[in-house]
Image: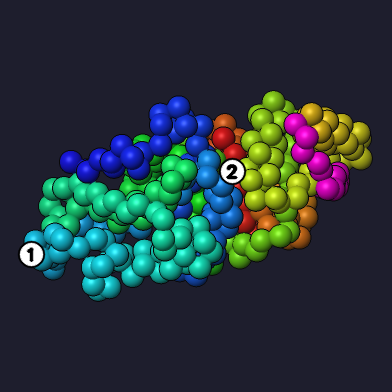
Amino acid sequence: METTLSAAAAAPAAQADKRFRILVCIDGTDESYRALRYAARIGGGNDADLVVVNIRPPDEAGRLAGFKDRTAAQGLLHWGLEIPGVRHLSRARDLLLELQAVEPQGWQEETGHIDVKGDELGDNKVVFTNNAGKKVGLKLKVATDVVAGILEQWDIGHYDLIILGASRKERSLAKSVWDPPVADRIAWRAPCTVLVASAIEEGHGHLICTDGSDRALAAVRRDALVASRCNCAISLISVAADEASLGQAKDNVENASRMLAGLGIPVLNKFTPVGVPAEEIIQAGQDFSVIVLADSGKRGFRRFVKGSVAQTVLRDARHSVMIVR
């Protein structure tokens, strides 16, 4: 079984329930480390925990046979860089140190392990905890499928937000429909909000989309609270299909703006373009760090048949997209 952190290192249960938990998935690409940098900014307070996970395939060939016994006294980050995933997690640790998301002194370090049938090393982690109870974890997890491994990790931690780098976009429409990239599958299958980071840059704010529905207003509220964690400016957009519906689009952004004002959250800009919603959102989103949309609520075959604005934006945008649920 996985080792339990000491009572001194564990936050009280009442505090843990209030903590904002972020899961960052890294695969060694520069995009995934840009995503980690953004995650560290969102999770910078002592009320937020951050877990960085790398999913590796089972060692079916037995190449790691005997390695567990040889490294029993060593922590995960002291293993050889030839072990799949260790290099990625070591780079993540170095980036977190650079960003001061973890300090070299004053943090307690604990390790954990879970045996995995058919794999010599199993799941392994290292968790750093500061005096305020904030936790930053690095985990090397075994799974036959990356998507399944990430979703299994959500089951363990019940995170508020998953962040991962975008998969490569050079795919045909048919390919993206029948075999969507890892990031897209996580965005639609995860039980929580998902940020798919693509060329993400800090300082350009969040563009939150609303169509006036209760689901969209809930997404506006949830992302506004996330954006406030990193002092990210918020702008609103509602697209009118034609001139006749322009008044409704304006009402949509005004209603969302009033709701945020009640939370003490200012709105920088309001946009109400006329046109095809997905196209207008993608165009406007080029000037922002993140485009934010509510989950459509469609599942499985309904999404395939009907599609959604959120699905189109996630597929076609070259900038970061957050799907809120």
Which colouring convention does the figure follow? rainbow
Q: Which mark is residue 87?
A: none
Q: Which mark is residue 323?
A: 2
Main SS, magenta region, reads loop
Decide: marks 1, 2 in contact (CB < 8 A)? no
Residue drawn at (69%, 26%) of the image: 214
Near-viewer residue (93 or 9):
9
* Image quarter of the C terminus: top right
**Could you say whether the residue bearing mark 1 is in a helix, strand or loop?**
loop
Chain-order first, disc 1 or disc 2: 1
Identity, as a three-letter code, of the amino acid under mark 1: Gly
Give coordinates of residue 233: x percent, y percent.
75, 50
Label 1 belongs to which residue?
66
Identity, as a three-letter code, of the amino acid under mark 2: Ile
Q: Is residue 40 visible?
A: yes
Separation of disc 1 and disc 2 at Cα?
43 Å
Disc 1 crowd, CA 10 A, few/some/many (<14, 14-19, 20+): few
Residue drawn at (15%, 64%) of the image: 71
* Image quarter of the N terminus: top left
Residue drawn at (19%, 53%) of the image: 122
Near-viewer residue (47 or 115):
47
Disc 2 crowd, CA 10 A, few/some/many (<14, 14-19, 20+): many
Q: Quadrant of residue 78 in the image? A: bottom left
Report whether 108 appears left or right of 229: left
- Is residue 321 found inside the magenta-colored segment of the image? no
**Could you say whether the residue bearing mark 2 is in a helix, strand or loop?**
strand
Write down the region rendered in magenta: 263-275
